[in-house]
């Protein structure tokens, strides 16, 4: 299963009020493990940078002035997220900006059935608690010490770790078998995942012999000794 953890930075809160997206950061995950593939892009918003927004992400109008327009990078972005579920914190905010930019560029909009909102997951798991990214990092002991400013790529990296915790962490004992029968509507099954190498026995040969002698003397008719 391919998922993209995504975050954006903007000049404000509402694209319909003239605010624009200035940064996109994406982390690719397959079967809930990072593949190392990223998409990261700064974007020229073609407008000034309000002080309040600059204080959040530290991206100045001057810094962004020579960056590409979203329309120039739209194809690369769409290609990167194509076919994947999007993992976004407070998804309504980011999707509103993404779809505004995608519509202006004449591209297919993000569909809500392809979005998982981690804020909703967090509120379900921790009702009434603080559930912003910093609070979730503290709750799950995720190091966010590098987060002096909000940054789309850094926040995506942190959110990827938070998302794994919200869905229960990496499960190593069971895996879901998505075989042909499942795809065709058949029964779903679970299969055990073997250890890469068996654990060594902690019993010495002498201890094993003492155990066998005890079984033969005390429970000599046990079914599991029939073939010994």
Image: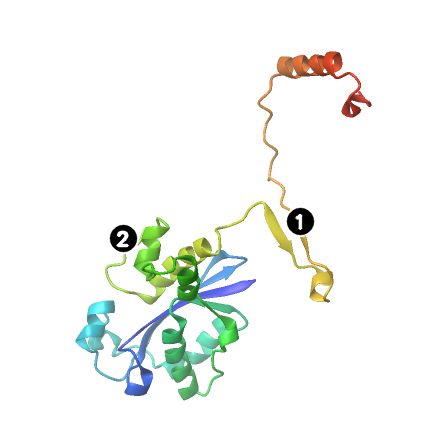
- Report the front residue among 216 and 78: 216
Q: What residue would you read off at disc 1?
A: 191
Q: Residue at x 48, y 56 (%)?
A: 167
Q: Which residue is mark 2?
A: 145
Quadrant of the frame with the C terminus = top right
Above or below 88: residue 139: above
Q: CA distance from mark 1 to mark 2?
A: 39 Å
Q: Nearer the viewer, mark 1 or mark 2?
A: 1
Q: How is the protein colored in the picture?
A: rainbow
Q: Residues within 10 Å of mark 1 (few under 14, many from 20)?
A: few
The residue lying at 28 percent from left, 86 percent from top is: 17
Residue 48 in the figure: left or right of residue 190: left
Q: Quadrant of the N terminus?
A: bottom right
Question: Going from the N terminus, do you reach mark 1 or mark 2 first?
Answer: 2
Q: Secondary structure at mark 1?
A: strand
Residue 118, position in %: x, y? 42, 64
The percent coordinates of residue 46 (x first, y second) are 27, 84
Q: Nearer the viewer, residue 223 or 88?
A: 223
Residue 112, x across and y down, in percent: 49, 76
Q: Residue furthest right?
A: 227
Number of numbered callouts drawn: 2
């Amino acid at each position: 299963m391919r998922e993209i953890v995504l975050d954006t930075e903007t000049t404000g809160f509402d694209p319909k009020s003239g605010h624009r997206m200035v940064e996109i950061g994406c982390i690719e995950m397959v079967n809930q493990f990072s593949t190392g593939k990223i998409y990261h892009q700064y974007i020229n918003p073609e407008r000034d940078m309000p002080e309040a927004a600059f204080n959040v992400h530290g991206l100045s109008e001057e810094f962004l002035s020579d960056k590409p327009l979203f329309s120039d990078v739209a194809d690369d972005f769409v290609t990167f997220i194509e076919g994947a579920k999007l993992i976004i914190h407070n998804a309504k905010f980011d999707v509103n900006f993404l779809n505004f930019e995608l519509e202006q560029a004449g591209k297919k909009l993000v569909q809500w059935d392809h979005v998982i909102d981690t804020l909703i997951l967090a509120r379900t798991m921790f009702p009434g608690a603080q559930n912003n990214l910093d609070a979730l990092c503290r709750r799950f002991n995720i190091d966010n010490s590098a987060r002096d400013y909000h940054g789309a790529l850094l926040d995506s990296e942190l959110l990827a770790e938070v998302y794994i915790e919200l869905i229960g962490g990496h499960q190593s004992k069971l895996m879901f078998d998505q075989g042909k029968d499942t795809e065709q509507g058949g029964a779903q099954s679970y299969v055990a995942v073997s250890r890469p190498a068996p654990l060594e026995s902690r019993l010495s040969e002498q201890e094993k012999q003492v155990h066998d002698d005890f079984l033969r003397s005390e429970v000599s008719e046990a079914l599991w000794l029939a073939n010994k």
